[in-house]
Image: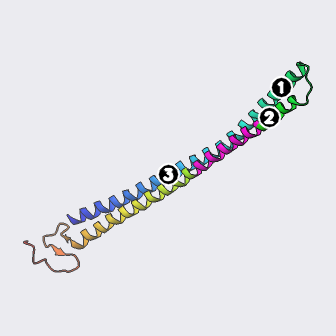
């Protein structure tokens, strides 16, 4: 019966190893997805800034038109309003860029963490597999082999085991 235990342990070790490889592959895929999301955040920030610039140019054009339509000149208060709008626009673009960089850094950190989890899963599976292999080896070293014969002999001894009743 010990050979059945040994075979079962080897099969379990193989399954543990396969499971570890699979889990590592899943975590690596999660890391790739997080990196892709990080790149998408950067592209989204560029797009958002472009859209903001379009809206800002429209706002500045409307502001100039309103100033000129009111009969005032583009000097003094009118220029101060346009300058203040431009300063606020730059600040808003900096905020969009900053938020994108923070989001990108978080996604890269998420990717790194996923890879670490994958490595840990693989190492745990290896440790489990080694445990099963050790169990198989121990089972084989302790066991008697009869393989259908009536003379049970200790493995490697060539002599009947005196402690067993045959």
Residue toward you, 40 or 32: 40
**SS state under label 1:** helix
Q: Which residues are magenta?
A: 88-108
Rounded to the nearest whole Å, what is the CA distance between mark 1 and mark 2? Answer: 12 Å
Q: Are marks 3 and 1 in contact (CB under 8 Å)?
A: no
The residue carrying pointer 2 sits among few (fewer than 14), some (14 to 19) or many (20 or more) residues within 10 Å by Cα, namely few
Residue drawn at (17%, 66%) of the image:
148
Query: Which labelled disc corresponds to residue 27?
Result: 3
* Residue at x-position 31% and y-position 68%: 134
Give the image quarter of residue 144: bottom left
Name the residue tied to disc 1: 63
Observer-nearest of 149 and 67 = 67
The quarter in which the C terminus is drawn is bottom left
Q: Mark 1 or mark 2: which comes first in sequence? A: 1
Q: Is residue 16 above or below residue 44?
A: below
> Which residue is identified by label 2?
84
Residue at 49%, 51% (x, y): give it.
27
Q: In this orientation, which residue lies closer to the viewer: 131 or 116?
A: 116
Query: Total label count?
Result: 3
Q: Secondary structure at mark 3?
A: helix
Question: Height in image: 45 above or below 120?
Answer: above
- Dividing the image into 4 quarters, which one contains the N terminus? bottom left
């Amino acid at each position: 019966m010990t050979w059945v235990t040994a075979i079962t342990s080897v099969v379990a070790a193989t399954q543990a190893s396969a499971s570890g490889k699979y889990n590592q592959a899943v975590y690596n895929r999660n890391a790739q997805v997080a990196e892709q999301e990080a790149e998408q955040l950067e592209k989204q920030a560029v797009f958002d800034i472009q859209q903001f610039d379009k809206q800002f140019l429209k706002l500045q054009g409307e502001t100039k038109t309103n100033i000129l339509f009111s009969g005032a000149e583009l000097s003094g208060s009118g220029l101060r309003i346009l300058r203040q709008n431009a300063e606020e626009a730059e600040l808003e673009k900096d905020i969009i860029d900053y938020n994108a960089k923070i989001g990108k850094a978080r996604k890269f950190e998420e990717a790194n963490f996923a890879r670490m989890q994958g490595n840990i899963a693989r190492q745990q599976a290896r440790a489990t597999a080694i445990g099963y292999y050790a169990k198989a080896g121990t089972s084989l070293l302790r066991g008697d082999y009869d393989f259908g014969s009536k003379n049970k002999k200790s493995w490697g001894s060539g002599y009947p085991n005196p402690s067993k009743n045959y």
